[in-house]
Image: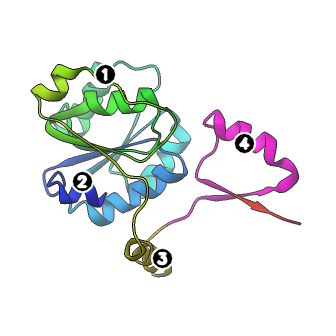
Amino acid sequence: MKKLRDAGKLGPGRTVGITGIGGLGAYAVQYARLFAGGSTVIALGRTDSKLAVAVENGAHHGINTRDKSVEAIQDELAERTGRRTVDAILDCAGAKASVSLGFDLLGVEGALVSVGLMSDRVEHRLFPFVGTELSYHGSFWSDYNDLVEVLALADAGKIRHNITKVRLEDINENLESLGRGGVVGRQVIVFD
């Protein structure tokens, strides 16, 4: 989120979309509310239960993107924000479809930061990318100071956690559920 802020893409009158509303995306929505300087926060996901968590965690709006065209999603964006595009996207999935959708929803001079790692490549049509002067950033990890800041936010109660405890002997079925996108929030392995 700080990369988008430092690139000048966040602030009052701006809109940031969060794609990949799972464990990481549920936190990203909260960081957007804390660090996006008054931007409208839109959660973009494929599961209503995950979008509900995103709204509980501070997203102004949630849009279910499952089986919808870019134009249909833009119509929903326009209904909620008055605009068909967003200024910034934080992609927490890294899936080919979510990154592509993110680029398609960016307005002129928009920026996309990818933290998810579901795919092994990023592809987008060159002319819209260059013609609208889009920016793309990757973000794998932060530094010690950011970690301290996140822990302080959690300690102050400013970060909500959506955690499901999983027994070690049930790990395989839970990993399969995670792979299908069936996990809301984070799973933590507990040892009995």
Left or right: where 21 falls relative to 91: right
For marks 2 and 4, give the CA distance: 31 Å
For marks 2 and 1, give the CA distance: 23 Å
Which amino acid, by three-letter code, is at mark 3? Answer: Leu
In percent of width and height, residue 25 lies at 46, 50
| First of labels 2, 1 by sequence position | 2
Q: Are marks 2 and 1 in contact (CB under 8 Å)?
A: no
* Secondary structure at numbered mark 2: helix
Q: Are marks 3 and 2 in contact (CB under 8 Å)?
A: no
Residue with the mark numbered 2: 4
Which amino acid, by three-letter code, is at mark 4? Answer: Leu
Numbered circles on residues, count: 4
Badge 1 density bin: few <14, some 14–19, many ≥20, Cα 10 Å: some
Residue with the mark numbered 1: 70
Residue range of the region highlighted in magenta in the rendering: 160-187
For marks 3 and 4, give the CA distance: 27 Å
Q: Are marks 1 and 3 in contact (CB under 8 Å)?
A: no
Residue 36 seen in render: yes
* Secondary structure at numbered mark 3: helix
In percent of width and height, residue 159 lies at 46, 69
- Mark 2 vs mark 1, foreground winner is 2
Name the disc covering residue 175, or none: 4
The residue drawn where x is 28% and y is 64% is 35
Residue with the mark numbered 3: 151
Badge 4 density bin: few <14, some 14–19, many ≥20, Cα 10 Å: some
Please identify the quadrant where the N terminus is shown: bottom left
| First of labels 3, 2 by sequence position | 2
Q: Are marks 1 and 4 in contact (CB under 8 Å)?
A: no
